[in-house]
Image: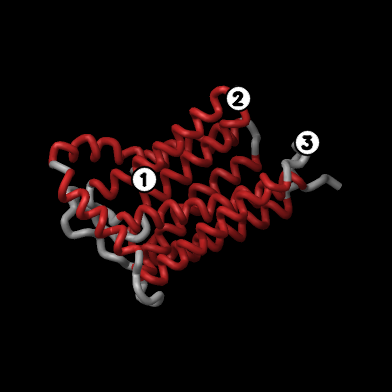
Amino acid sequence: MAWSWIDRYAALGGLALTLAALCGLVLVRPPQTGARPPLRARRAPALVGAAAALALASMAAAMAGHGGPVPWLALDGWADTWMRQHLTSAWRGPLVAFTQLGHVGVLLALGAAVLLALLWRRDWLHAGMWLVGTAGTGLWTRALKHAVARPRPEHGWVAESGHSFPSGHSAGTLALYALLAWLVLPQLRRAWRLPVALAAICVALAVGASRVLLRVHFASDVLAGWLLALAWLACVIVAVQWAQRRRGP
């Protein structure tokens, strides 16, 4: 009952969160953070977000039956064939354990811990970024699930309810671990930055892959979850970069 209510009003919640975030950026004047980053660095998130949003929109339209042929089904077919040929039941236990890294309870607990840490440091801008980035990803995921209403695979090893497209585990994991890396990397020594970034990417990719291997999602669902997270995080990062460049009165 709770999830159905959330699904019904997720789009309104996402819009309200977006409006609140924009109002906060306009009303709050963050301190200057030094020299502006290079133009290329400022454009990169916008370009990545635009590309991800366009790809996601084309997938959603096709899945909903408004986009003609569905080329993404070829990806689903290839993944299903590979799993039937190579995957055995011995993998189920490890996969079920690993996929918990993307479970909503784990993501909520870690997200709350990071938010409290940012609030304790009085880092209001990044606390707002964290809340909008993680919560917004969840809301837009639920809204898209409700809009597309794609059934889950029928041959899953693990029984899960709800719609399949996009994968909430994939979107939530990428959003949380990517944002966490984005916040932590500037605080680390240069030698540690690449390993930490790669670790965050690998966790997000592995959790998404586990959803396909457990057959609770199609491969295209996972891809859509990653695209959604990238598009939303790009919007959030661009907004924060704009706020950081604003000058006080």
Callout 3 amino acid: Gly
Q: Is 99 drawn above or below residue 168 in the view shown?
A: above
Q: Amino acid at mark 1?
A: Val
| Residue 139 spot, x, y in % from top left | 45, 57
SS under mark 1: helix
State which tag comes first along the sequence, 3 or 2.
3
Tell me where residue 182 appears, x and y as whole percent.
56, 38
128 lies above or below 18 = above
In the image, which is nearer the foreground, mark 3 or mark 1? 3
| Along the viewing direction, whichever of 84 and 239 lies nearer the viewer | 84
Identified at 66% across, 51% down, the residue is 43
- Identify the disc placed on residue 104: 1
> Which disc, if any, is residue 112?
none
Mark toward the start of the polypeptide (3 vs 1) = 3
Q: Residue at x 66, y 47 (%)?
A: 240
* Relative height, residue 120 to residue 217 (above, below): above
* Spatial CA span between label 3 and label 2: 19 Å
Q: Which residue is mark 2?
A: 190
Identify the residue shown where x is 46% and y is 55%. Answer: 227
**Residue placed under numbered mark 3 in the picture:** 34
